[in-house]
Image (cartoon, rainbow, N blue to C red):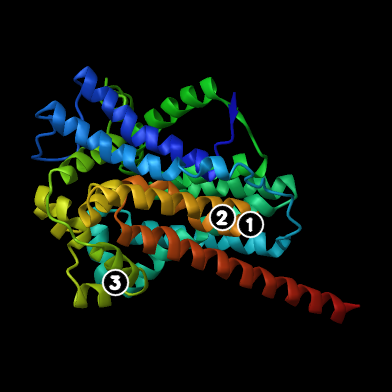
Amino acid sequence: MKIQIHNLFNLGIILWVIYNILPLIDVILGNDVAVNLEGYNTSFTSEKDLLVTIALASLWLAGFVIFKGRNQNVATLKKSNYKVNFWMSVTTIVVSIVVTVSYVKIFGEYSRAEKYLVTSSSSMANIINASKTVSSYWLILVIFYAKKKNVIVISILTFLLLNFATGSRLPFVILIICLAKKYTLKIPVIKLITCGFLLIFVMQQYKSVWFLAKNQRYAEIPTALWQNISPSVSSFEPANTFALLHYCSLSPNLNFGMSYIYGIVYSFSPSLAKNIMNERLTTTTIWELNREKVLKGGGIGFSGIGEAYINFGYIGPFLIGIICFVCVTKIEKTNSFFLYLMILTAVLMYFRSDFASLARNRIVIPAFSVISFIIVNKLITEFKLVQNQTKS
């Protein structure tokens, strides 16, 4: 059997397995879970604790797949007539290089927590940070819609080099999925599982390699790679997310949807959200686990399923699962890559994000990126058209 990994429904199932089944395997095998949660005892004290955690994850899955039988005819992407002007491609590459160089100069020496403090205190730093994300989306759009192979290859190489320079991992995953969609690839299940484990391993090692390379400590890279090899099948983000879901399951206090309201306000005005609402509504668990890290702007991810539970109880994950299903199937049926790209990052990050950061960084900014790309491409196309008419 072959699977289209770019299909958002399939992607949702794959990510659910990564963030819930792989950590469960580690719990059963007795491996370490949530290695990045400082000061948090990640042992599951009873079978009941583990069963509640799996039940919450399963409730989301039930909501996500319950209507699948009635929605079998998910449209496949048709060949688009949308054209990216050659000079738009050149502009995108040049702008991406300029923005990335500026980003590295500003943030190159900072940790993630320090980066948060810089963007909070400097408007220019905040603009450069957002521009780096926008330029990555612009490159993805050029890669997807470009017809000339040389433009595609140059754009891909630029994308890879610039994102390695900034230490970002998520863009690489986005690129792989968008290329799979561009060429409508279908992958056999066995190959998908093998490649999935390989990708998880590479993503685990990537941050260490990038950090050492940035500091020109090349000789330490082989040792770091060996030391970072873990017997766990769900190290780092998947393990953290599963442990956070477990921690959320122990919390009897409900927010009754307030974290989602906060997220909507935050996505358009972070300062307004923080002024009128409790900014820790979406980070309650992280705040309790590591207050010092949160105060410095750091984080350890979150759990979308856990957030649904601490808002609405057991019905929360099930309802959010239904909402996620409706969203991804509606997007798939539009046959629009623009809409697809707007929602793709949110799908990829849902399981390990709170709604506030998901809404702003994974929906609003991608939407702005797509809309601005369309506008600039149109302006350049019309300008070149007028210029050609003037010459003739």
* Amino acid type assigned to the residue bearing label 3 in the image: Pro
Among the two numbered marks 2 and 1 on one chain, the one whose residue lies closer to the N terminus: 2
Residue ID for mark 3 = 270
Among the two numbered marks 3 and 2 on one chain, the one whose residue lies closer to the N terminus: 3
* Amino acid type assigned to the residue bearing label 2 in the image: Ile
Q: Position of residue 197 (x, y in %)?
A: 41, 26
CA gap, disc 3 to disc 1? 30 Å
Residue ID for mark 2 = 331
The secondary structure type at the circle numbered 3 is helix
Q: Is residue 125 left or right of residue 181?
A: left
Residue 60 quadrant: top left
Identify whether 321 is placed above or below 20: below
Instruction: Look at the image and tell me whether residue 304 can be seen.
Output: no
Q: Position of residue 74 (x, y in %)?
A: 62, 45
Mark closer to the observer (3, 2): 2
Front-lying residue, 71 or 169: 71
Q: Farthest residue in the bottom direction?
A: 390
Front-lying residue, 384 or 71: 71
Residue ID for mark 1 = 336
* Amino acid type assigned to the residue bearing label 1 in the image: Ser
The secondary structure type at the circle numbered 2 is helix
Q: Residue at x 39, y 48 (%)?
A: 321
Residue 130 quadrant: bottom left
Which quarter of the figure is the N terminus placed in? top right
